[in-house]
């Protein structure tokens, strides 16, 4: 999730730590029926298999691109390394992040 525009691991964040701050979760990323470009890219590239990691991957991917840390495959891998995909979708996740980075 994003707290005041910065990505944090929700599983390591106590609710009280986010008190009074702007919190954005995957549910708040789309604008009504219009998906965020990262969500569109994940659909296009089939960037999920189990789905458990998908919200975190998308939120981290959005921040990674915004931070300017997705300029190369290696850079995106490094800056997304806190979000693990243990199945076969990782190359597709990387493709989605890199595609959005190329359009921003
Ligand atoms: S898509 Fe969730 S671990 Fe790979």
Image (cartoon, rainbow, N blue to C red):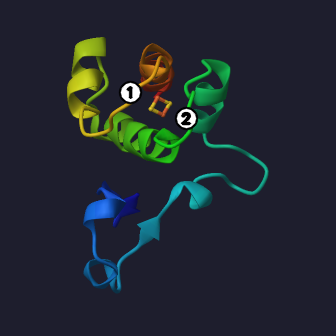
Q: Residue 91 falls in which quadrant of the image?
A: top left
Q: Quadrant of the N terminus?
A: bottom left
> Which mark identifies residue 39?
none
- Residue with the mark numbered 2: 38
Front residue of 86/8: it is: 86
Classify residue 100 as left or right of residue 66. right
Give the foreground label among 2 and 1: 1
Q: Residues within 10 Å of mark 1 (few under 14, many from 20)?
A: few
Image location of residue 69, percent across then percent down:
26, 30
Placement of 1 over or under 104, stated as above or below: below
- Residue with the mark numbered 1: 86
Q: Residue at x 30, y 13 (%)?
A: 73
Classify residue 103 as left or right of residue 66. right
Mark 1 vs ligand 1: CB below 8 Å: yes
Classify residue 85 as left or right of residue 74. right
Which SS class for mark 2?
Answer: helix
> Residue pushed farthest right?
33
| C-alpha distance separating marks 2 and 1 | 20 Å
Front residue of 59/102: it is: 59
């Amino acid at each position: 999730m994003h707290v005041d525009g910065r990505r944090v691991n929700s599983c390591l964040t106590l609710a009280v730590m986010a008190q009074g701050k702007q919190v954005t979760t995957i549910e708040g990323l789309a604008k009504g029926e219009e998906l965020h470009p990262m969500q569109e890219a994940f659909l296009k590239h089939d960037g999920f298999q189990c789905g458990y990691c998908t919200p975190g991957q998308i939120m981290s991917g959005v921040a990674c691109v915004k931070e300017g840390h997705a300029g190369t495959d290696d850079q995106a891998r490094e800056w997304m390394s806190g979000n693990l995909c243990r199945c076969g979708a990782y190359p597709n996740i990387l493709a989605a992040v890199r595609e959005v980075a190329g359009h921003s």
